[in-house]
Image (cartoon, coloured by chain):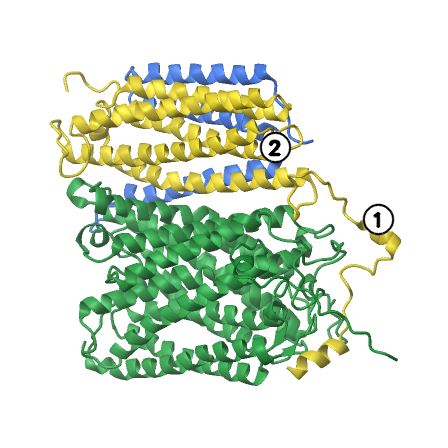
Chain colours: A green, B yellow, C blue
Amino acid sequence: MEMTLAAPRVDYLNVRHTVASWLLTKDHKRIGIMYLVVVTIAFFVGGLFASLIRLELATPAGDLVSSDTYNKLFTMHGVAMVFFVLIPAVPAILGNFVLPLMLGAKDVAFPKINLLSWYVFVIGFLFTLYAMITGGVDTGWTFYTPYSSRASSTNVMMTGIGVFITGFSSILTGLNFIVTIHRMRAPGMTWFRLPLFVWAHYATSLIMILGTPVIAITVLLVAAERVLHMGIFDPALGGDPVLFQHLFWFYSHPAVYIMILPAMGVISEIVQTFSRKNIFGYSFIAFSSLAIAIIGFLVWGHHLFVAGQSVYAGLIFSFISFLVAIPSAIKVFNWTATIYKGSVALDSPMLYAFGFIGLFTIGGLTGLFLSAMGLDIHMHDTYFVVAHFHYIMVGGAIMGYLGGLHYWWPKITGRLYSEFWARIAAGLVFVGFNLTFFPQFIAGYLGMPRRYHEYPPELQVWNVMSSAGASILAVGYSLPLVYLVYSLFAGERSPADPWGSRGLEWEIPSPPPTANFEVTPIVTHGTHQYAPSKEVGVV
Amino acid sequence: MSNGHTRAEHFPGPLHHPPLTSGEARKHHVPHEHHPKLQHHFDSMDQQLEASTLGMWVFLVTEIMFFGGLFMAYLLYRWANPTAFQEASAHLSKGWGAINTVVLIVSSLTMAMAVRSAQTSAKPKTQVMWLVLTMVFGAAFLGVKYVEYGQKFHDNLVPGPHFVWTGQYPAGAEIFYSLYFCMTGLHAIHMIIGLGIMTVIAIMAWRGSFDARYYTPVEVGGLYWHFVDIVWIFLFPLLYLIGAHYGAGH
Amino acid sequence: MSGHIASTNLYYAVFTALLVGTGLTYAAALVDFGFFNNVVMLAIAFTKMMLVMLFFMGVRWNSRLTWVVAGSGFFFLLIMFAITMSDYMTRGWVPGTLK
């Protein structure tokens, strides 16, 4: 029998090769990849600053850099990581790519606005980079007044402009997702047949829409005070610097849920695929995503416990902060119950998922310590706080992102990466992460303040462990850059569904054609409908 | 990744859609309109209009929160400095403020009429007339603001090193004027952007782009315009009218 | 075809109501009602806003989703106002703490 030579299949990657076809694309899949490039650059920029921080902190004396320079290092590490990595990573890269596929749609609701959001992101990043290169900022990523509005002589304005512009990228992405999810679902795709990744991104988009504008106006007000001398936060005029903190954290606390919710959505997908089991408690996880988004708007004052906020307000914020942990915990229980008695495969995405579940739990529990006002008085501005949020941001969000990147890599690129090296990288990241950040809990508990470039000598052992861990972490993060890029050229071609998963995105070829679906799919039931397991009888 | 391959073979999954025969495929094929303005990722003009309207409303929510931060600052400082705010507000011209309020209300009317004219497939000239009227009133609003700001500069009421206040509460007055300039300034910027948007829409209308089947940009532009009007509806009393009955002889 | 088309009479009626509201709020400001001035002012502004939203912006004839979206913005704004003010208004309530 003769083999008929088929023409090479046209997909969204090879349909056109010109630079213009990328820079003027309206295809959500290409835009996702363009975000991947910029976010990866931002990640290594932030990582560079982190390396310098850990290098300085390996010795108790402030001997590597001056205190002023150190202030700039941790500020720029924070700005780069928060605004240019953590917030966009999962939504703008994985969300942009996968969300329309999961809905059975040809694209997002507003493809041109999607492209605009990328350009806005790049412009904001360029402004911020320029600020970093031409002298830096030293206010902390939280740029509290009155230091940021009056006293700091560094590039506050330029960084503020960069952050302000980038905020619009977030807003446009959230806007696009909300309208897409409401109006672009395939026939039969009811809300409760949506993948949990979609629910997570819906909740995230709500936060992007409601929260980001508030930090935008706050940045403008700081700029107004710096440049136009309009003293809204100026005590000399009867202004209140704490008002800045209220406005800043009104966004920045929900922002941390922007960072974690999408990663949780990734975990929900990975855990089902690699346990060969439907999620335990689908509605609970879906509603928990919404609950986290909404309750997350009510807790910002827990950043102001020692700022002069009233004790009664602090009481309410403390109580609600305990409440917001509940939906997160529900998710952890449900993921665990999903894995229990599942047919578990330890592919690299699942390794990241396991890492996420454990490390997020530790980070979340330590958040409860900090929610208790009495404890926070001792631990505020210590390394305990730093460790807490890195467990969530890095042990949680970044691991979720890496898990998702690996999980959907075959779909995005049509290539399979080296599972051997991926497992090594995942292991290095896990070990390196814990060695970096667990000692920081101890150092913080013992009183080591954050944002100082020197510390008492008795704390050195914890800092040395942390810096050693950071070097392992650096290797762990650099490896994917190597083997993932290598797979683009020499990786085995991927079938439509390399993991044996369930979901609309796995039913189209890898990589997908530009229009995603030849015929609009008609959905008849929800995703991840695995065959019943003999023991448990789960459907 | 050999694991991935074998697993896929052992666990064939139920498809999300049953294999369609060609007859069924034709039945299930979602009908496609072919209006020249229908973007290809949408299935119908209706879906496009609904999605665009929803998108603009979501954007307006971000604008509510954006201005909201300023209203928060106003709320706090007015609560903390009630008399200072009244004293400072008395120096604003209620007359200009009222005129501007009326001007914007008229512009909202003409905007609504412009949308309606597109919805009813009115002649392009009629559509453009309503749009241009809207822009004229918008420009008038900005003209009044220009006059007002000029007066403030002249009276040394711009916060900063040149601020001079002879009344009882200089600090509170300076905060009031900081808020005044920030809030009305941000509003004016939105107005200018609105004029830009209206220019584009007017040009499209002039070219006959809009009729009952397609008027999405007018609808969506109208929503933005009305929102800017609503912000002023709150700014006027909160900034201009709180000192109206403030003690005489200040 | 989609979207409800309102009558011009309705638009003119709303327009008139908005002008009346503006006049009322101006007149009320000239009289000293004390704190009640704020209530009157905000009530009139709120009514004018609702008129613009319902009729000029067409929310009256839009899907419930539009209502929810528009309402959510105001709801979260109120949260920002209420909780932040609850901080400032309760400072100094506990003896010995910061005022």
Task: Pick the residue in front: A337 or B190.
Answer: B190
Quadrant in the picture for the C terminus of chain B: top left
Task: Pick the residue in front: C33 or A448.
Answer: A448
Give the residue at x 86% y 79%. Answer: A2
Q: Residue furthest left?
A: B166
The part of the image, by quadrant, that contains residue A444 is bottom left
The part of the image, by quadrant, that contains residue B137 is top left
State left or right for residue A464 relative to residue B227. left
Q: Position of residue A129 (x, y in %)?
A: 33, 61
Give the residue at x 39% y 59%. Answer: A83
Give the letter of the chain under mark 2.
C
Give the letter of the chain under mark 1.
B
Q: Position of residue C45 (x, y in %)?
A: 41, 25
Give the residue at x 36% y 35%. Answer: B189
Task: Pick the residue in front: A9 or B119.
Answer: A9
Q: Are marks 2 and 1 on the same chain?
A: no
State left or right for residue B48 relative to residue A261. right
Residue type, label 1: Lys
Q: Residues within 10 Å of mark 2 (few under 14, many from 20)?
A: some
Residue bearing the label numbered 1:
B27
Can residue A91 be seen from the camera position used here?
Answer: no
Residue type, label 2: Asn
Q: Give the Cα separation between the discs numbered 2 and 1.
A: 31 Å
Residue bearing the label numbered 2:
C62
Q: Position of residue A243 (x, y in %)?
A: 28, 46
Quadrant in the picture for the N terminus of chain B: bottom right
Give the residue at x 13% y 39%. Answer: B161
- Which SS class for mark 1? helix
State left or right for residue A297 relative to residue B124. left
Q: Position of residue B61 (x, y in %)?
A: 47, 40
State left or right for residue A393 relative to residue A284. left
